[in-house]
Image: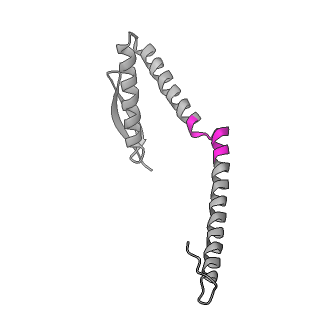
Amino acid sequence: MSQQRIEVTLAGQKITLATSAEHEPLLRAACTLVDEQIKLAINGGNRSIERASMMAALKIAGDLITLQASAQPSQDQSTTNLNSEEISRLHDEIRSLEDQVDTLMQTLSLPGSPRPIVP
């Protein structure tokens, strides 16, 4: 994996970074996101680039933590999964019972049976 240099702009400053061709799109997208957050922090009243950069980092870190927390199954979700497994088992049991009923109805509806069973 060979390294290449790319130029990006963060907070109005051009920066050269090393990355692989494979990771370049992700790095560029990350730089765009960071640059946007820095601009928002500056427009929000943070006059120094350092303070705006820290505020942008905190905002992005907060978003990441929120996403990580929502990606982890909570107690309610694991209960739902158990309920889903139970529901799936019950569906299978219902299908089996329906098959048995169909078989019994065919047997009872055979010619010569006392009366036909109509579903």
Give the residue drawn at x 64%, y 64%.
94
Give the residue drawn at x 63%, y 78%.
103
Along the viewing direction, whichever of 81 and 9 lies nearer the viewer: 81
Which scheme is used to colour this image of the protein? one colour
Along the viewing direction, whichever of 17 and 72 lies nearer the viewer: 72
Most extreme residue toward the front is: 114
Residue 104, by quadrant, is bottom right
Q: Position of residue 65 (x, y in %)?
A: 56, 30
51 versus 33 height, above or below: above
Residue 83 is covered by the magenta coloring: no
Q: Position of residue 90 (x, y in %)?
A: 66, 59
Q: Magenta-highlighted stretch: main secondary structure?
A: helix
96 versus 41 height, above or below: below
Q: Position of residue 28 (x, y in %)?
A: 37, 36
Residue 77, by quadrant, is top right
The image quadrant where one finds the C terminus is: bottom right
Residue 76 is covered by the magenta coloring: yes
Left or right? Give the position of 112 relative to 55.
right
- How many numbered circles does the render carry? 0
Along the viewing direction, whichever of 70 and 64 lies nearer the viewer: 70
Along the viewing direction, whichever of 14 and 57 lies nearer the viewer: 57
Give the residue drawn at x 66%, y 44%.
78
Q: Which residues are magenta?
A: 70-80
48 versus 90 height, above or below: above
